[in-house]
Image: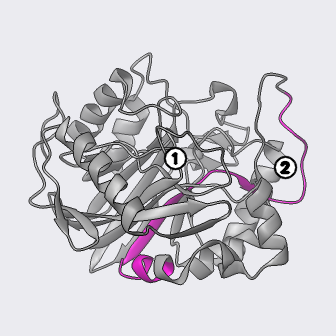
Amino acid sequence: MRLGLAGDTMLGRGVAERLRRDPPAAVLADGVVEMMAEADIVVANLECCISDVGQRWPDPDKPFFFRAPPGAAETLAAAGIDCVTLANNHALDFGPEALLDTFRHLDRVGIPWVGAGPDRDRARAPAILTGGGFRLGVIGFTDHPAAFAAAPERPGVAYADLRAGDLDWVAEAVRGVDADLVLVTPHWGPNMVRRPVSDVRRAAAELVSAGADLVAGHSAHVFHGVEGRVLFDLGDFVDDYAVDPLLRNDLGLFFIVTLDVGGPTRIEAIPLALDVGHTRPADRAEAAWIADRFTAACAEHGTEVRRDGERLVIEPVGAEPAGSTTR
């Protein structure tokens, strides 16, 4: 199976304005859509609700609220995204009403979701996708905020407290998935950091030990390195965010991971440039910066990256995260 992975996909604010006036495909350049089409299945982190209803979450300390118009569902479908995770700190920006509306819009265009639900059981449930001759189970969860957590009779996100080391339900879900391969896609750790924090590294090892074939995280807004079957952070994919001049969150990667029973056999990372509300293939100078940054980030985990034309390739895929055991 060739699995495509897109990081934080934020279709609110300035991106939403573009979606209202331009065709659905306007936020992604043709070259980006073409690279996505190489994958059998594409999974993304949808970092907003899709709705025109609801009220802002009543937290005076919450600085950002992201809501995409209903037409954003067509944008995702037109791009070829096959599944989204909603387990993040923006799924409930406009409350339970908007979250439930998001489910309806995704259903309308035939895109399954994970990581949120009308109750806790549904939020924690996997999606089962078929591609490349395999059945892929996808599980999403987030470690923030606790206030967004779904309850037995309350809509919300699939929450796990990494600081407390509370991953029992996630590990049980991984072991219980009826599929050939299992992807866990967590929204974990702080924003705008260069490398995964210790809580994230410990959790990654536990997820691999539980049997995850691939772990692909997000939240930092910048891509991190790869260690074995763990992509610690995918970075951003579409947004309108302010740009840090050192971390360069306006430069990203789209990943295509070749998966077989037992885990990934090849990881391709394709450089992207994120303009405001529009993502395109990186130009030569941008791609060179991305290549240097990604190579250094992977080297911190003992992972070697080679360049294959415009792509950054890890092959063969190396050792597991420290503390983990293989299946």
Discs 1, 2 touching: Cβ within 8 Å: no
Tell me if residue 55 is in the magenta stretch. Answer: yes
- The way the protein has been coloured in the rendering is one colour
Residue 195 placed where, x, y %? 35, 32
Q: Amino acid at mark 2?
A: Glu
Question: Disc 1 on helix, strand or loop?
Answer: loop
Give the label on residue 249, or none: 1
User: Magenta region: which residues?
Assistant: 33-58
- Residue position marked by numbered label 2 in the rendering: 97
Count numbered badges in the picture.
Answer: 2
Give the label on residue 114, or none: none
Q: Quadrant location of the N terminus?
A: bottom left
Q: CA distance from mark 1 to mark 2?
A: 31 Å
Residue 10 placed where, x, y %? 65, 55
Q: Amino acid at mark 1?
A: Asn
Residue sitting at 39 percent across and 29 percent down? 167
Q: Quadrant of residue 272?
A: bottom left
Residue sitting at 40 percent across and 44 percent down? 233
Comes first in the chain, label 1 or label 2? 2
Q: Taking 319 as reference, is 250 left or right?
A: right
Does the image show residue 59? yes
Does the image show residue 265? no
Tell me if residue 110 is in the magenta stretch. Answer: no
Question: Disc 2 on helix, strand or loop?
Answer: helix
Residue 257 placed where, x, y %? 27, 65
Rendered view: 48 above or below 75: above
Residue sitting at 12 percent across and 50 percent down? 304
Q: Taking 286 as reference, is 259 left or right?
A: left
Residue sitting at 77 percent across and 71 percent down? 19
As drawn, which residue projects farthest toward the front? 285
